[in-house]
Image (cartoon, rainbow, N blue to C red):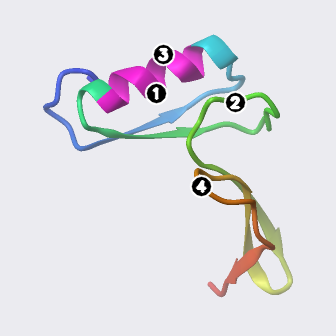
Amino acid sequence: ILRSGVCRAVLSWFETLQPKLVRRLQLAAEAGQCVSLLFSPQASEHSSASLRLALQYSHKGLQVSILKRRGAWATGPVYLHL
């Protein structure tokens, strides 16, 4: 689906993410010009993903922490008030 070019975005949920799988999905998404969002309860330090976010609920709202992004260092958390 990612490589085909028929979808603009694909959301996937995984219990665990293997680095090789993440890389294969990333390359397929780039080939098909598709956005691929992978959700997992597991945080991986060694991921080829372009953007890695951590979501956590806090008393201030939903805390979004940028763990990795292209072109710059990660910044402090952002709070989304729900």
- Residue at 68%, 23% (x, y): give it: 17
Q: Label 1 vs label 3: CA separation? A: 5 Å
- Residue at 82%, 34% (x, y): give it: 45
Few, some or many C-alpha atoms within 10 Å of disc 1 (few <14, some 14-19, many ≥20)? many
Residue at the spot of label 4: 71
- Can residue 2 be seen from the camera position used here? no
Q: Which mark is residue 24?
A: 3
Q: Label 2 vs label 3: CA separation? A: 11 Å
Residue at the spot of label 1: 26
Few, some or many C-alpha atoms within 10 Å of disc 3 (few <14, some 14-19, many ≥20)? few
Q: Label 4 vs label 1: CA separation? A: 17 Å
What's drawn in magenta, residue-wise? 21-30
Few, some or many C-alpha atoms within 10 Å of disc 2 (few <14, some 14-19, many ≥20)? some
**Please, what is the three-letter code of the amino acid marked with disc 1?**
Gln
Looking at the rendered structure, the secondary structure element under dot 1 is helix
* Front residue of this view, candidates 47 and 43: 47
Is the residue 34 above or below the residue 26 in the image?
below
Residue 27 x, y percent position in the rendering:
41, 22
Is the residue 22 above or below the residue 36 in the image?
above
**Please, what is the three-letter code of the amino acid marked with disc 2?**
Ser
Residue 54 x, y percent position in the rendering:
74, 55
Q: Does the magenta-highlighted stretch encompass residue 57?
A: no
| Circle nearer the N terminus (2, 3) | 3
**Please, what is the three-letter code of the amino acid marked with disc 4?**
Gly
Mark 1–mark 3 CB contact (< 8 Å)? yes
* Front residue of this view, candidates 74 and 24: 74
| Circle nearer the N terminus (3, 4) | 3
Q: Label 3 vs label 4: CA separation? A: 22 Å
Q: Label 4 vs label 2: CA separation? A: 16 Å
